Image (cartoon, helix red, strand yellow):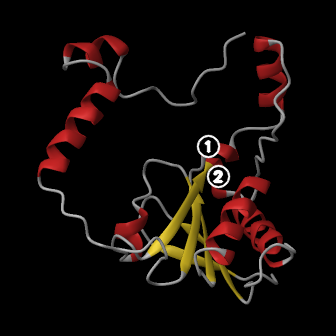
Amino acid sequence: MSISAPQPLPHSADSVSREGGTVTDRLVAANARYATEFHDPGMDARPVLHVAVVACMDARLDLHAALGLRLGDCHTIRNAGGVVTDDVIRSLTISQRALGTRSVVLIHHTGCGLLNLTEDFRHDLEAEVGQRPAWAVEAFKDLDKDVRQSMQRVRTSPFLPHTDDVRGFVFDVHTGLLREIDPQA
């Protein structure tokens, strides 16, 4: 049984190869053009604004533009759904303890692919490949509730020394606006 994407892909593999190689080839070529005008900004790895943003990996979210951020302003941690998993806690711990961040912004979004998945995804994957994934899908049906859960996971982590400024939002992919989630509602 093959697991398919919920939406059609924008280009077929044939159209990609007709455009001059694979997508990765095009990305490497774009990097070569970028590097010809690149100047080392001389920045430190510590984010200027002392903030880490945890968000969904959805390609429709241009976080820097949506939040008015520039290169060097924040750490950006992205995964499917923007959920706070053990690996996100790992990254936030390094961000806070080694690189000086103090604030955490969590961003989920409307139309998220995890709204349509269930843990059956893992079972189907196991049936297809013969090995059970070690990770949970972390699917959800209620965006606001999942943002609250993510905020709670950050606030209660024993590894994170800075949990006073943890705020969660839902980004509307149609309007570009953030809606803040009350952690107590």
Q: How many marks?
A: 2
Q: Can you give x and y, in whole percent of width and height, for residue 144 in the image?
A: 72, 68
Q: Which residue is drawn at the image coordinates 79% and 38% (left, top)? A: 118
Q: Mark 2 points at which residue?
A: 81
Q: Quadrant of residue 168?
A: bottom right
Quadrant assignment for the N terminus? top right
Relative side of 41 to 92, left or right: left
Quadrant assignment for the C terminus? bottom right
Mark 1 residue type: Gly
Q: Can you give x and y, in whole percent of width and height, for residue 167 in the image?
A: 65, 81
Q: Can you give x and y, in whole percent of width and height, for residue 80 in the image?
A: 63, 47
Relative side of 71 to 20, left or right: right
**What SS does tag 1 mark?**
helix
Q: Name the residue under label 1.
A: 113
Q: Which residue is drawn at the image coordinates 82% and 72% (left, top)? A: 159
**What SS does tag 2 mark?**
helix
Relative side of 43 to 169, left or right: left
Q: In which quarter of the image is residue 18?
A: top left
Q: Residue 101 carries which label?
A: none
Q: For residue 18, say whether it is visible.
A: yes
Q: Which residue is drawn at the image coordinates 58% and 30% (left, top)? A: 6
Mark 2 residue type: Gly
Q: Nearer the viewer, residue 112 or 57?
A: 57
Q: Which of 159 and 2 is in front in this view?
A: 159
Q: Which of marks 2 and 1 is in front?
A: 2
Is residue 37 depicted above or below 153 in this figure?
Answer: above
